[in-house]
Amino acid sequence: MLATYNAKLRNFLIANHYMDTPAFHAISGRDIVHKFGYRACP
């Protein structure tokens, strides 16, 4: 699954240990766009 994410998001998830457990971690759409460089929906 990590391979489908861009490097910024992938590094964030690994550095913050989000992928170490099966727990759900929400990331807002705003963060996805502004912090990780994904395009906003039209």
Image (cartoon, rainbow, N blue to C red):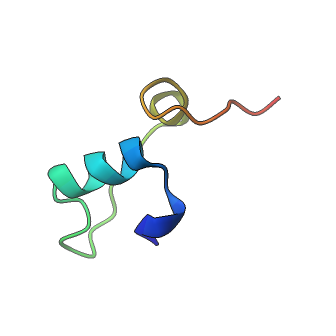
Residue 2: where, in percent of width, then height?
Answer: 42, 66
Residue 21: where, in percent of width, then height?
Answer: 20, 73
Residue situated in front as seen by the camera: 14 or 20: 14
Q: How many numbered marks are there?
A: 0
Q: Going 17% across and 50% down the picture, which residue do you hit?
A: 15
Q: Going 46% across and 72% down the picture, which residue do you hit?
A: 1
Q: Going 34% across and 63% down the picture, which residue do you hit?
A: 24
Q: Is residue 1 above or below residue 39?
A: below
Residue 12 visible here: yes
Residue 37: where, in percent of width, then height?
Answer: 53, 31
Residue 17: where, in percent of width, then height?
Answer: 16, 59
Quarter the C terminus occupies: top right
Residue 26 visible here: no
Q: Is residue 32 above or below residue 5?
A: above
Does residue 40 appear left or right of residue 20 in this picture?
A: right
Residue situated in front as seen by the camera: 30 or 14: 14
The residue sitting at the top extreme is 34
Q: Is residue 9 above or below residue 19?
A: above
